[in-house]
Amino acid sequence: MAVGLTVEIKGDTSNLDKALDKSKGGVGGFGDMLAKNALPIAAATAGVGALVVGVANLTQAAAADAAEQEKLEAVIRANGAATAESTAQVEAAIAAGQEKAFTDSETRAGLESLIVATGDVGVATDLLTQAQDLARFAGVDLATAADAVAKAQAGQDGAIRKLVPGLEKGATASDTLAAASAAAAGQADIYADSAAGMGSRASDAFGEIGETIGAAFLPVLEEVLPELLPILKAFGELVTALLPLLIPLVKTLAFILGLVAKALATVVRDLVGFVTWVGNAIGAVGDFLEAANPFQNFRFPELPFGIGSAATAGTRARSGRSGGAAPVTINISGALDPEGVARSVSRVLTQHSIRMGRSSALSTG
């Protein structure tokens, strides 16, 4: 819900008006200026915010990519595989992997286990091609397939057999790896040419562009973060120091709010109880009045003729085509005395019987 804010200034505003008039034609002009520029200012602010967030995300991606590179380089050095060509071999393997819809992160993760198993970057990149086909054939990630290939290189073919069921039992690990590679040959290229593969390649290409842009901001972060970290640390210490003071205040506020909530709940319960009592009382009064009504069970005696409207009775009497006894209308008004009602009904019936008798005699004569 939008909430409006109105500021009313009472007193002499001439000085304020003059000051604003110098910049934009008085108070009214100042308001017009804000109204005209509010949308551009908001858009610019939102754009700057989005730009900052976007740069931060790209820089983070670039930093993660750099960390992966350093990790792989450490693995190469630790296994004595660092050569003058090792860096170029890794870059070539990453480029080839991207053509087959594997990201640079996936390629590096696959190379790590193969380099550990072989101690040679060139051999590891050759085996990586087999691992890529096995990954697409078995529907697993590249690191899992590369680990299975590395274990087969070390004489353990159990992982390969799980990825490619139906391989010959009793064969050597090398033969098992060769048979698995033959069964899965070309699967990486087939996937790369599919719609899903091309979508993955396009997404990875955009990701690489973002990492390139983010890498340009890494030197800035490297300069800023050392100065920023002490400030953040000091702020954390300030928060830690203030917490012992803030916690009792928060607890006190929560306690007060709890009391208010309980009081409101009690008032609501009492109000509901009162309304219920009033409803029950009204119902009881209605039941009492109904029980005290002396005519609630009163019924007129059965009559040997129908009771209709006076106009109908008169019309039938005059026309002489009643087809039976003429209807009678009995009006009772005033205080309802059972005995009086009975007497009135008896008198009316007697008079009606006399009239009916006379009419019959006239008709007979």
Image (cartoon, helix red, strand yellow):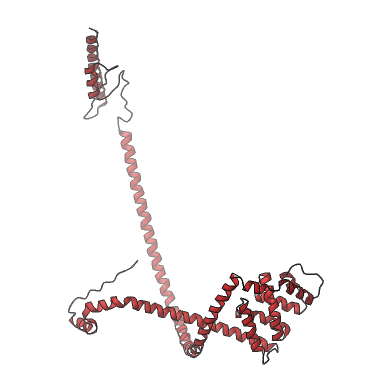
Question: Residue 42 falls in which quadrant of the image?
Answer: bottom left
Q: How far across and how far down the image is residue 233, in percent? A: 48, 85
* Residue 301 versus residue 116 in the image, above or below: above
- The single residue placed furthest to the right in the displayed view is 170
Q: Is residue 71 left or right of residue 9?
A: right
Q: How far across and how far down the image is residue 59, in percent? A: 51, 83
One can see residue 286 in this view: yes
Q: Quadrant of the C terminus?
A: top left
One can see residue 340 in this view: no
Q: Residue at x 71, y 70 (%)?
A: 163
Q: How far across and how far down the image is residue 27, in percent? A: 22, 78
Q: Residue at x 43, y 74 (%)?
A: 248
Q: Is residue 146 left or right of residue 336?
A: right
Q: Nearer the viewer, residue 335 or 122?
A: 122
* Residue 331 versus residue 324 in the image, above or below: below
Q: Residue at x 71, y 72 (%)?
A: 184
Q: Quadrant of the N terminus?
A: bottom left
Question: Residue 269 falls in which quadrant of the image?
Answer: bottom left
Q: How far across and how far down the image is residue 263, in percent? A: 37, 61
- The single residue placed furthest to the bottom in the displayed view is 84
Q: Is residue 192 left or right of residue 47?
A: right
